[in-house]
Image: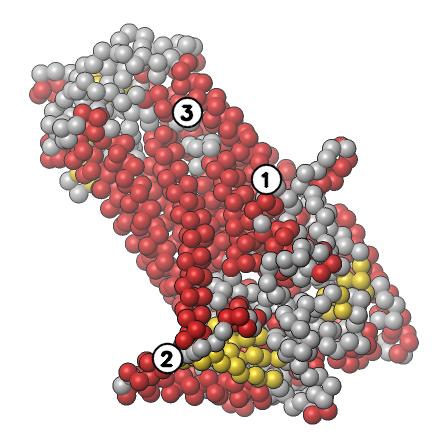
Amino acid sequence: MTSEASSGSRRPRSGMLRRRSPEEDSTVLIDVAPEAEKDHTYGSTAPTSEQSGHREAAGRVGSPSKPRVDFVLVWEEDLRLGRQQGGAGRDETDTRGAWRETFLDNLRAAGLHVDQRAVQGENGAVHYVLLRAPWAVLCYYAEDLRLKLPLQELPNQASNWSAGLLAWLGLPNILLEDVPDVPPEYYSCPFKVSKLSRFLGSDDQENFFTSTERHQILFAILAKTPYGHEKKGLCGIDQLLAEGVFSAAFPLHDGPFRTPPEGPQAPGLTQRQVLFRYWARWSQWNKYQPLDHVRRYFGEKVAFYFAWLGFYTGWLLPAAAVGTLVFLAGCFLVFSDIPTSCAAAPITLRCARSAWTAPSGCSPVPAPWPREHSAGRRAQGSHASHSRARPRPQAGRLFDHGGTVFFSAFMALWAVLLLEYWKRQSATLAYRWGCSDYEDIEERPRPQFAASAPTTAPNPVTGEDEPYFPERSRVRRVLAGSTVVVMMVAVVVVCLVSVILYRAIMAILVSRSNNTLLAAWASRIASFTGSVVNLVFILVLSKIYVALAHILTRWEMHRTQTKFEDAFTLKVFIFQFVNFYSSPIYIAFFKGRFVGHPGNYHTLFGVRNEECAAGGCLIELAQELLVIMVGKQIINNVQEILVPKLQGWWQKFRLRSKKRKAGASEAVGQAPWEADYELLPCEGLFDEYLEMVLQFGFVTIFVAACPLAPLFALLNNWVEIRLDARKFVCEHRRPVAERAQDIGIWSHILAGIAHLAVVSNAFLLAFSSDFLPRAYYRWTRAPDLRGFVNFTLARAPPAFASAHNRTCRYQAFREDDGQYSPTYWNLLAIRLAFVIVFEHVVFSIGRILDLLVPDIPESVEVKVKREYYLAKQALAENEALSGTNGAKDNYSQSSERSLGPQPTLPGGGQASQVPSL
């Protein structure tokens, strides 16, 4: 077999960069000898059990007489559009047709079998291109892609800490369920044709490669096959899909997901049916996820997402329990707290929007905004007013009490432990799934990068020449893209300011209402509607920015798909962080801080700055969090349930109507590729990860204001797991199985959020809560807190009182002349000291926990060391047999001459328990 594209990996090493020659831009061609094909006719598309006693070949539907299909391309032809098109439209259609034919010709030249089918209708047709890779092509690309194939079977080592704990305690485990057809584990190594006989099942060429491996090979060919000049970007199936040349490109599912009418027989279930029955059904909400089955069918990347989601959901259980207890304690304090218990206090004058009065030893009740207030006079604070309606401030005690201090510290340590134990879980899964060194050694350059890179350079790990883009040029592009990100963040800030102005103006308008109830709750109404407007801004800006981030990340020329996704993820998360958290941050740390005092109120664009409502800013922050967090969850879940059903119904209706018009009978049944084309395209995992990470931020960063956030997150995630599982198994086309080493940059983002949560909650408790002022008053004045509200009120300056011939009070620690009082400075020192102590204590305990909990379990470390030792032993034995004494730094060359592929442990480390290797 020969290949022009492979020449870059087989050229002599060179330490210098060089310009890629035009010949290297040509298509990937493989000379397949006719004799290599004579024994490989189209095989069965029916799912079979384990092949050669080792691995199961999945993804084939039908009887043995039907052709094996590795990948499907689809394009639709609209005859009515062709008749109506003018010259320009017809030229575009002709261009797409030429691209399509060139692409298919190049696929044939690459050695693929291309079979075209069509479903004709009156006004159009749906064309299906069925692709199959023969044995020679599979072997060539498996070696080129460094696919890891099994050398020796091992017993399945899956375990669950909760299952082990319950078994040790002798308690029944309702979460445990026996799932049939458990995938075995293997010692594996990168495939080499020259060492074919040493791999398991090598005598069965038809089933040697599993369906997921065949899909990966086919997609790699599709991704780098050109349909024009590569330097112009005319390369790969992704670009053809974007240009509308093809409508879809997907591998086939493993038959229907529902079991046959005669009843489920576990040995006869396909992989898809096993996943549906034991994972994707709603009745499985209280069972462990079969992650090994998910990994076998969908690949490591999808399996890591569901492993993280299940792990995070399990850890939400203790957080939700403690948060609910803290909330119930707040409910009890609402009725027993002295400063907020005097609801029948007499009403006197108030200063503009903040006047208070209190009888001796009793808390006052805030008065609402006056109806007669005008925007202009309010901005100047020119008069006092009064009213007889009073909203109750007791609601603030639901979240503002001593229990929130404990809960904030608890959640900070909870986040640290969650991430530390996830590192252990991730390392264990990466070891078992054989992908511990995927990013460093195995991952190949992106086809789009390879087509556009101007030079080649040796890979520092493998020593092979690979496409190279200068790092300095990439840094310049990243910096340029960062300016666009900053500009979009500025747009979010502008939207936040507009929401602030909306709240102020809406509060003024509602306070003028003749309806007493509306006037009394003007502040709450303005705050709630402002939250809804902010949510609309969030959703609209998110759609715009995600599309922009895709363009910027492609322009930055990242080498591998992992680095590309990490860069894209970081851009979008920075924007979404500001987008979703800007309003809660404003309420928590800025609202009511820059109001001024009677006679000297501060304004923004002529509108007086907002103040916190009667219960304080903490209750408003809790309301904001619930609107954004719970509202977003409800919207997302409704979209994920209803929108796919509507889209799927429309797709089926559209395609089947064409078939009926053509006179085809539905009784004949659908081909597998037709049934799968009626499903929705799989759009990846980015949105799923983003949803969970933003939720993690709401659960940790502002948990002091809303102890119920973990409970709402837990309830949502119970639904989310099965909803996403059902989406992958039942509603979406099968994605190409992708390898991954972990959850990527999301783990670093989660760690950053956990650290930010400590700082955020420290400032929230110190400056937005009444916890420290109450403690200060209890220590210095009255242990029973009688008179506390009067302690927090200041009198209007004499000039303001004489100008209006009356006095009033407002919430602040100020002297009569408007200057800050000594109590203000004492409390400021206490608050800053609290922030420093809280942060240092929590960070210190978190660091200790980090040191006590190793990132990699000891059992995994022992296995890695054992297998590394065996690899060295195997190397020494083979060197002795071959008579070579090469130095260890030339291990890769000597092993390729004498050993072939070096065995690796399931986690990617070097290993061998096969002495012959």
Name the amino acid, label 3.
Answer: Leu
Question: Which residue is labeled 2 in the image?
Answer: 123
Neighbor class of circle 3 (other Cα within 10 Å; few <14, some 14-19, many 20+) is many
Quarter of the image that includes the C terminus: bottom right
What residue do we see at 45% from left, 52% from top? 641
Q: Are marks 3 and 1 in contact (CB under 8 Å)?
A: no
Q: Secondary structure at mark 2?
A: loop
Residue in the foreground of this view, choosing between 498 and 172: 172
User: Of the residues under marks 3 and 1, which one precedes in the sequence?
Assistant: 1
The amino acid beneath tag 2 is: Asn
Crowding around mark 2 (Cα neighbors within 10 Å: few <14, some 14 to 19, many 20+) is: some
Amino acid type shown at disc 1: Trp
Q: Which residue is mark 3?
A: 398
Which label's residue is closer to the chain start, 1 or 2? 2
Instruction: Please give the name of the residue rendered at 18% of the width and 14% of the height, measured from the top-left corner.
Output: 348
Quarter of the image containing the N terminus?
A: bottom right
Residue 749 spot, x, y in % from top left: 51, 50
- Image x and y of residue 676, in percent: 53, 68
Tell me how far mark 3 sits from mark 1, CA to CA: 24 Å
Residue 320 horizontal/vertical position (percent): 53, 33
Q: Which residue is mark 1?
A: 315
- What is the distance, in whole Å, between disc 1 and disc 2 at their CAs? 55 Å
Q: Earlier in the sequence, mark 2 or mark 3?
A: 2
Q: Is residue 856 left or right of residue 792?
A: right
For label 1, count other residues whose C-alpha is less than 10 Å away and answer few (under 14), some (14-19) or many (20+).
some
Q: Is residue 414 visible?
A: no
